[in-house]
Image (cartoon, rainbow, N blue to C red):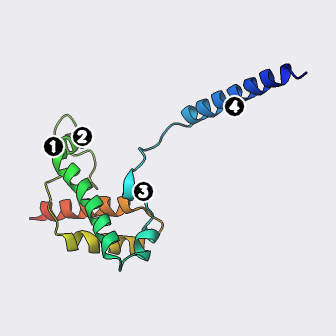
Amino acid sequence: MKRILPFISAIVIFLVAIMSSSSGQAAGVSSPEILGAGNLSCRVVLKNTEDKGLRKFYENWAQGWISAANHFSDLIGEGLKTDRGRSISGEFPSPTNIVPRRDVIWYKILGYCSEEPKAKLSDAVKELLRSQWDKAQDK
């Protein structure tokens, strides 16, 4: 019995590992995981509004995402069009390079998070992008 026990334990561990990896694949990933500060809830952001270091950290994270959106704006725009050049998403404006001021970034984040405390910081930045793109289209 003493010889069989380690063998059975190894088999059980192996089966658990296989089952857990296959169940993750079967579930599929609905959307990519947001990395860094963007994965923080708005509640966390709202708890730290007076901390200048954290404010700068959140703003910098948002600026990084905005820079990426500016860099890939042509690709994003092409992805939103059909083969005839019309937008496939009426609710999503065409991307344009935007350069919002730091205070605009911060107050847009605070405004969104105040209305949607269960949302993530990344959701607030997406809304900031959408509003800035709408503003650029109106000009």
How far is mark 3 from mark 1, CA to CA? Answer: 26 Å
In this rendering, the label closer to the viewer, 2 or 1: 1
Residue 95 spot, x, y in % from top left? 18, 52
How far is mark 4 from mark 1, CA to CA? Answer: 45 Å
In this rendering, the label closer to the viewer, 2 or 3: 3
- Residue at 30% across, 61% down: 125
Q: Please say whether residue 83 is visible from this viewpoint.
A: yes
The amino acid at mark 4 is Val
Please identify the quarter of the rendering in which residue 26 is found. top right
Q: Quadrant of the C terminus?
A: bottom left
In this rendering, the label closer to the viewer, 3 or 1: 3
Mark carried by residue 74? 1
Determine whether, in the image, residue 109 is placed left or right of residue 94.
right
**Circle 3 — which element?**
helix
Give the mark, 2 or 1, whose residue is nearer the N terminus.
1
Decide which of 87, 23 is in the foreground and name it: 23
- Residue at 17% across, 51% down: 70
How far is mark 2 from mark 4, CA to CA? Answer: 40 Å
Categorize mark 1 by other alpha carbons within 10 Å: few (<14), some (14-19), many (20+).
some
Q: Which residue is mark 2?
A: 79
